[in-house]
Amino acid sequence: EVQLVESGGGLVQPGRSLRLSCTASGFTFGDYAMNWIRQAPGKGLRWVGFIRSKAYGGTIEYAASVKGRFTISRDDSKSIAYLQMNSLKTEDTAVYYCTRWDSPYRFDYWGQGTLVTVSS
Amino acid sequence: QSALTQPPSASGSPGQSVTISCTGTSSDVGGYNYVSWYQQHPGKAPKLMIYEVSKRPSGVPDRFSGSKSGNTASLTVSGLQAEDEADYYCTSYAGSNNLGVFGGGTKLTVL
């Protein structure tokens, strides 16, 4: 059974950092691109970014709103994707979801989400 | 990319059919047959309902169907049931070096 479990969310002050993890099981993690998608309270879904599989160069794309502040990485040996969030702003407050990207374009499995609250 | 345009709300009575639209541009919806739809119940993670415009993952009832014409994709829910009440989001591929774009979401109410 495919499972994605996010962790690392919590309350953090503006300007500080937080690292989220997405631990995967039930599939060959290294074969898939992984996404981070967020949802602010009462709002819609928004891309944060994604990381391709090593077979496609492991390259990464970011949303303009987080580029330069957030870093996505992956450890295929541990089946974990990471989202390092620096210089956090109040507008980064959201539930952050990790999803698997199955070719050519479907997010077929989602984690339960982890809430990040940026507030002083 | 700009967000895809969805109506904020839609409604129907049990047993009826409802169609939700998702309008983009020739750079996303109109340019690729890679539109997918997600259902989200309150407090839950989204669930894939339709991919590649009209394909259903296993386990999704055939009451859910998708289509596309030009720059507009549509999700139709036939034979509405109470459990279909949820938010629905569309998203489209927008090129190999671009993030996709999401619609703003449509709240479907079963009257």
Image: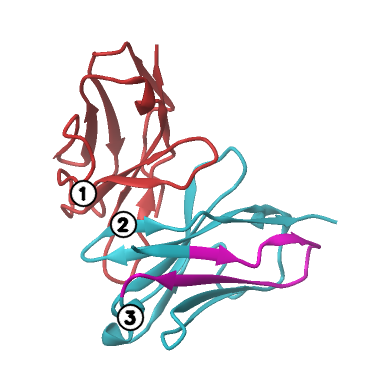
Chain colours: A cyan, B red
Dot 2 alpha-carbon crowd within 10 angstroms: few under 14, some 14 to 19, many 20 or more = some
Q: Which residues are magenta?
A: A5-27
Q: Is residue B13 above or below residue B97?
A: above
Decide whether residue A20 is among the magenta residues: yes
Q: Which residue is mark 1?
A: B57
Q: Amino acid at mark 3?
A: Ser
Tags 3 and 1 on a common chain: no
Q: Amino acid at mark 2?
A: Asp
- Element type at marker 1? loop
Tags 3 and 2 on a common chain: yes
Dot 3 alpha-carbon crowd within 10 angstroms: few under 14, some 14 to 19, many 20 or more = some
| Residue B6, percent from left and from top | 36, 33
Direction from residue B100 to residue A90 in the image, left or right: right
Q: Nearer the viewer, residue B2 or B89?
A: B89
Q: Residue at x 47, y 58 (%)?
A: A111
Q: In the picture, which quadrant includes the C terminus of chain A?
A: bottom right
Q: Which residue is mark 2?
A: A108
Q: Earlier in the sequence, mark 3 or mark 2?
A: 3
| Residue A2, percent from left and from top | 35, 64
Q: Which residue is mark 3?
A: A53
Decide whether residue A25 is among the magenta residues: yes
Q: Nearer the viewer, residue A91 or B61?
A: B61
Q: Is residue B88 above or below residue A29?
A: above
| Residue B30, percent from left and from top | 19, 48
Q: CA distance from mark 3 to mark 2?
A: 16 Å
Q: Residue at x 37, y 53 (%)?
A: B101
Tags 1 and 2 on a common chain: no
